């Protein structure tokens, strides 16, 4: 097989990139090691920045999002037993966020790709990338007992943190920065109405809590937990009791509980790999960076990378190489700002026992300043709805 761009990975980064490039007349193929059902079964976050919403619309894949998604104009911060609303729309000049699950975004982009007849290969075994430091890169894989080769001009590594793309880069050519947080998030999904119309981020002496949702009838809740915790040790009742203890009185009294339909513990880390381009191999999304979910930046940062990468490749096929030369630098400037925001939100809202009373007092002062200062609130809002893309 011969294509212009081979995309490794069928998560949001790969699907967004494939759709943008195909609509620009650039031939692509997506190669995914997992099955389509597995990819669609992954439960992920679901807060879309304004820019992500706009790109879905431009791709003609936003209909279901607008029918089922929830537009949010603010968020609530809870501390000292009181909630304080941050008016995102007012403070950011009219921007909002959309609550719409990453699984649904993936579903919509898969449907759009299939409807247009663009090629995707699922359950590809032993995927490998070769010769990306030459002008003849290729991807190989095995399927149905046969070996296959994809010759291409470029390879887009969109296969996540544990994928083959970043692992194929020589250690001497890549630098990584990482921070591991000393706790995780225990999350559950339940068919219960959300406790609030907007997300609640709670700083509590017992630890962080987040009240989110997927729809008016499906809720997503999280509590900070130890990395030593096991899901099996958390009954539904224990979870609901713990969540209730970390909320303000009004939310605790109105919280509707029910059986969980999914329950998991996720560790938190900040991770960045530099650079994001190696000859004719480009990294995008989780293959290049991971952020803690506190700032709702993971999926949106992948879309940011794809926006710059698609622009670079479209310009290349139009005769301009500058885009591919500057891809990594353009991405990383925005990546590090999102990493900073996600780190700041995490440090602001979680319990860090090792920081002691001093750390708690600093958190309290930071929260009090944040909700009492329009300038500070505006900074949070600007970052939360998504920083502007470079022209």
Image (spheres, grey):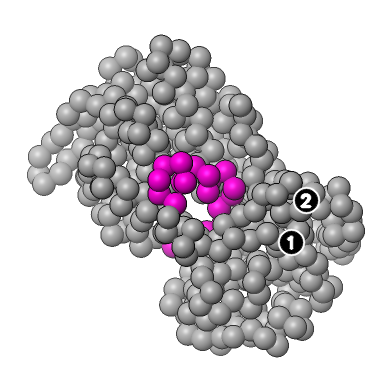
Task: Please name the residue shown 64% across and 72% down the image.
Answer: 197
Q: Is residue 15 magenta?
A: no
Residue annotated with mark 1: 349
Q: Is residue 315 above or below residue 176?
A: above
How far apart are the alpha carbons under marks 2 and 1?
21 Å
Q: Quadrant of residue 157?
A: top left
Query: For mark 2, what is the residue?
Result: 91
Q: Position of residue 245 (x, y in %)?
A: 71, 82
Q: Nearer the viewer, residue 214 or 25?
A: 25
Front label number (2 vs 1): 2
Decide if residue 382 is on the left or right side of residue 149: right
For the residue carrying disc 1, how many other residues have a C-alpha within 10 Å: few (<14), some (14-19), or many (20+)? Answer: many
Quadrant location, the N terminus: top left
Check disc 1 and report its element: helix, strand or loop.
helix
Q: Is residue 300 left or right of residue 16?
A: right
SS assignment at label 2? helix
Q: Residue at x 31, y 59 (%)?
A: 38
Dot 2: few (<14), some (14–19), or many (≥20) neighbours within 10 Å? some
Q: Quick check: is 47 in the magenta stretch? A: yes
Instruction: Tell me residue 362's x, y (percent).
Output: 87, 57
**In the image, is residue 296 above or below residue 58?**
below
Residue 205 lies in quadrant: bottom right
Image coordinates of residue 89 in percent, x first then y, are 71, 54
Segment tinted magenta in the rendering? 43-62
Q: Nearer the viewer, residue 20 or 106?
A: 20
User: Picture coordinates of residue 174 (x, y %)?
Assistant: 51, 27
Q: Tell me if I can see residue 130 in this picture.
A: no
Of callouts 2 and 1, the N-terminal one: 2
The residue located at (61%, 26%) in the rendering is 391
């Amino acid at each position: 097989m011969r294509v212009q761009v081979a995309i490794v990975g069928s998560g949001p980064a790969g699907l967004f990139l494939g759709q943008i490039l195909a609509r620009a007349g650039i031939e692509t193929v997506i190669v995914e090691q997992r099955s389509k059902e597995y990819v669609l079964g992954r439960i992920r976050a679901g807060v879309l920045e304004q820019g992500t919403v706009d790109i879905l619309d431009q791709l003609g894949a936003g209909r279901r999002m607008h029918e089922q998604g929830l537009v949010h104009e603010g968020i609530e911060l809870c501390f000292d037993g009181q909630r304080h609303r941050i008016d995102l729309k007012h403070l950011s000049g009219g921007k909002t966020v959309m609550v719409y699950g990453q699984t649904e975004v993936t579903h919509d982009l898969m449907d759009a790709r299939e409807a247009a007849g663009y090629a995707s290969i699922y359950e590809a075994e032993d995927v490998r990338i070769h010769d990306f430091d030459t002008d003849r890169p290729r991807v190989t894989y095995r399927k149905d007992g046969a070996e296959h080769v994809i010759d291409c001009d470029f390879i887009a590594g969109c296969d996540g943190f544990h994928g083959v793309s970043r692992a194929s880069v020589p250690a001497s050519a890549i630098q990584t920065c990482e921070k591991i947080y000393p706790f995780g998030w225990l999350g559950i999904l339940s068919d219960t109405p959300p406790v609030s119309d907007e997300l609640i981020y709670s700083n509590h002496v017992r630890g962080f809590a987040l009240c989110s949702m997927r729809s008016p009838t499906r809720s997503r809740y999280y509590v900070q937990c130890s990395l030593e915790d096991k899901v099996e040790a958390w009954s539904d009742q224990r979870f609901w009791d713990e969540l209730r203890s970390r909320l303000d009185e009004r939310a605790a009294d109105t919280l509707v509980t029910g059986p969980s339909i999914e329950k998991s513990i996720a560790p938190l880390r900040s991770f960045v790999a530099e650079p994001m381009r190696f000859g004719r191999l480009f990294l995008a999304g989780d293959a290049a960076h991971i952020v803690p979910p506190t700032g709702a930046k993971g999926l949106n940062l992948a879309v940011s990378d794809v926006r710059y990468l698609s622009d670079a490749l479209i310009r290349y096929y139009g005769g301009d190489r500058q885009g591919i030369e500057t891809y990594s630098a353009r991405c990383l400037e925005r990546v590090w700002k999102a990493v900073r925001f996600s780190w700041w939100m995490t440090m602001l809202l979680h319990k860090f026992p090792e920081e002691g009373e001093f750390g708690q007092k600093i958190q309290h002062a930071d929260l009090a300043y944040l909700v009492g200062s329009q300038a500070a609130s505006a900074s949070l809002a600007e970052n939360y709805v998504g920083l502007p893309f470079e022209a």
